[in-house]
Image (cartoon, grey):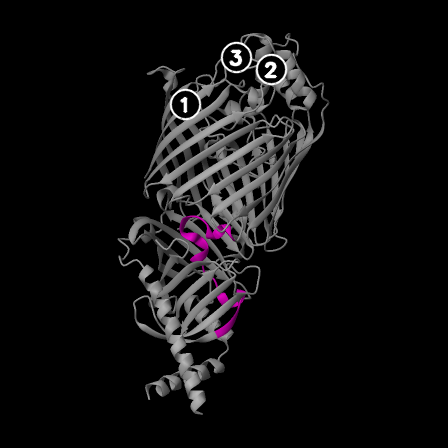
Amino acid sequence: MKWTVAWLACLGLASTAIAADEDKDLDLIPRAEPAAKPAAAAQPPGSLARIYVENALMFNTLRNDLLVPAPPPLPPHWEERLFGDARVEWPLGPNAIVAYSGRLNVVTSDDIGFPSRENVTHDLRELHLSVEPRPRDYLDLGRINVKSGVALGFNPTDFFKARAVVDPLTADPSVLRENRLGTLMVRGQHVGDGGSVSLVYAPKVTDPAPVGADPDRGFSPLFGRTNASNRWLVKGSARLRDDISPELLLFGENGHTKIGANFTESVGQSTVAYVEWAGGRQLGIIDQALAFGRQTGTIPDSAPSVIDQGSREQFRNQAAIGASYTTENKITFNLEYHYNGAGLSGDDWNRWFSAGEGQSASSPIARQLWYVRAYAAERQEPLQRHAVFLRMDWVDFLVPKLELTGFALADIRDGSTLLQLSADYAASDFWSVGVLAAATTGGRRSNFGSLPQESTILLKVQRYF
Amino acid sequence: MMLVGFAMVFAVNAHQAAAQTAQEIVTASDRVRNPTEPFRSTLVLTEYVSGQERSHSAFVLFSKPDASARFANLLEYVEPPRDAGKRVLLDGRSFWFYDPASKTSVRISAQQRLVGQAAIGDVLSVNLAADYSATLAGTETIDDAARQKRNTWHLELKAATETAVYNRVEYWVEHGTFHPVKGKFYSDSGRLLKIIYYRAFSDRLGAQRPSEAVIIDAVDSSLATIAAFSDSRFQDVPDAWFQRDYLPRLQVR
C-alpha cells in the first residue's frame, strides 16, 4: 500500500512537472486584446465589393538580334499605368443581383504620348443580371466571364478565353484570368445536391476585330473580341463521391464542336492530381491564323501564304496533366505537362525561321510570320506542341505576409523558357507593394528565345478600399 | 500528508477517466465546441506578430455535420478588402478555393488548407472524435488561457482517417464540464505546428461554448492569431451548397 501511494505520488509530481512545462506556452499568447472588430464583420454586407487602385511601372528590355525581326508596334521600353479596379455586386431583392466588374486605366509609355486619346481606357469585364427564380436555379444575362478548367498553366476547356485578355501586367497564365473580358451571353444553371449543369449561349453581335488592333478602344466594350461568332456551351458535373466530381463540357462555335473534361483527385494529405482535356476538329494554329487574318482583312486575299501547315481539319487533342504539392513550409508547387495538338511541329518551326531569316521587320513576310504568333497569343493558345510548366507559391516567405511566386514554362522541343518571379507584400490590411521580374531565355531559333521581349521589371503599389 | 492527498486526487481522477473512455471525452468536448445542427457564424481573426496586432481577417462561416458527425464547411472572406469575396469549401477530402478575381475554383490539398492567410483549417468546425482515436495520457492541472487552474484530462489523439488535418494531437479537456482547454497539433513528421487555447466561454448556439481560440504558430512562435466567433445562429444549409459549382453563387446576406 505504501509503495502504491508513493508511486501515485510520483506520477502526480511528474504530471505537475509536465503541466509546468505546458504553462510556458501561455507566454506566447498575445497580451493585447484585439482592437475594434472590422466593420464589415460586424454586419454581413448586403453588397459585395472589392475596389482598389494600383500604380504599375514597367520596364522592358528588347532583343535587337532577332533572327526574324518583329514588325512594329514593339513592346514599349517603359510603361506607366494607373488604374482603378472594381468588382461590385448589388442585391436587387432577395433573389437577384446586378454585378459589375471593370478597370479604368490611365496609361502612358514611350509609345503613347501624354495627354492623348489613347491614355484613358476602360475594360468592361462584366456587367450582368443574375436571378434565382427557384432555389439554386439561376438565369444570368449580360457580359459574363465563364471560365473552366482545373489546370493552372494551360486550360484547354476554357473555351471563352480566346482574345479575352487585354493589357496583361503579368505573363503568369494563372493570373492572366484576373483581367479578362467576359462574353455577352445568356446562361442558365442548376446546382443540385448531386451535381450541376449549365447552358450558355453567346450570340454574334459584331464582326471580328483584327488581331493586334483595337481601334477606338477608349471605352469600347470590345465585342469584336468576345462576341464575333455564335457560341454555345453545355457544362455538367456530377458528385460521384464526396471527393470526386468530374466535369464534362460540350462547346460549339460556327458549326465546330469540341468536347472537354476536367478531373481532380486528392492524393494523400499534400497532393492534388488533375487532368484537363479538350478535343475537336480543327486546323493547325498557323492555318487558323492565316484564315482569320484573311477573314479580317489583315492579310490580303491575294497575298500568298509565307508559311502554312497544309493541315487538314482533323480531330486534335489539347491537354494539361499535373499535380500540386504543398510542403509544411507553406510552399505549393504545381507541375504540369501541356500538349497542344494544333501547335507547331519541329518542321513548322524550322519553316517559320527559314522563311523569316534575313527579312526586314516591315516586310510582308515578317508581318505574316509574326501575325501567326500574335494570333496565338491573343487566343491564349500555346504555339508549342509540348511544354512543361512549374509554378511555385511561397506564402510567408522570410516574413509574414510576403508571398513569393514564380513559374517557368519550357518548350520541350527546344528548351527555351519563359520565367517569372514576383514578390508581393501586404504591408497592411489596405496597402500592398510588389515587384515582378520576367525573362525569356533560349537560342535565336527557339520559341521563347525569338521573342522581342527579353526581360521585364514591374513595380507596383496597391491601395484597397 | 500532502503527497497522500495529491495521490488521492490523482486516484479519483483516474477513476473518473476509467468511467469514461478517452474517445467519449473527446466526443463530449466536441459537443462543447460545436452544436449538432447546421449553423452560421461570423469569424474575426486578429493576427499578431511579436505580440503586436498586425492584420485582420473576417469570414462568414457555414457549417453542417453529416451523419458521421463530420462537418462540411463553407466560408466567405469579408475582410480584408483585398480578400473580400474569396470562398473556401472544405468537405471531407474535397477542398476548393474560389477567387472572384479570376472567377475560378482551384482544388487544394489538406496540407494547403493550413497554408496562407489565417490558416483556415484551424478555425473551421471540426469534430476531433470523428477523425482521431484517443487515449488517455494522464490527468493534469494546467493553466487555461486566462491563467486559471483547470483540472484536465490529457488526451493523446492519433489520426484515424484520411480527413484528419493533423497526424497527432495533444488535447486537454476540463473534468466535469468537458470544456476544451488547449490543443497541440503535430505534422506527419512529428513537428509541433500549432498550439491552440480555447477561451471566452459564453452562451452561443444553445450552450456554453468557447467563443475565442488563440492559435499560436509553434514553428514561428512570434506569430499568433486570435479567432473570435460572433453572430452565431442556427441555419439550415442545403447539401447543394457544399460543391464547387455553388461557390460562385454563394450570397452572404
Q: Dot 2 corresponds to which residue? A: A369
Q: CA distance from mark 1 to mark 2?
A: 26 Å
Quadrant holding the N terminus of chain A:
bottom left
Rate crowding at label 3 as few (under 14), some (14 to 19) or many (20 or more) other CA atoms within 10 Å.
Answer: some
Disc 1 residue type (three-letter): Phe
* Residue lying at 59% horizontally and 55% vertically, measured from the top left: A242
Secondary structure type for disc 1: strand
- Tag of residue A59: 1
Residue at the outermost bottom position: A1
Q: Dot 3 corresponds to which residue? A: A71
Which quadrant holds residue B202?
A: bottom left
Chain for disc number 1 = A
- Front residue of this view, candidates A255 and B158: B158
Q: Position of residue B151 (x, y in %)?
A: 37, 76
Secondary structure type for disc 3: loop
Q: Position of residue B41 (x, y in %)?
A: 39, 58
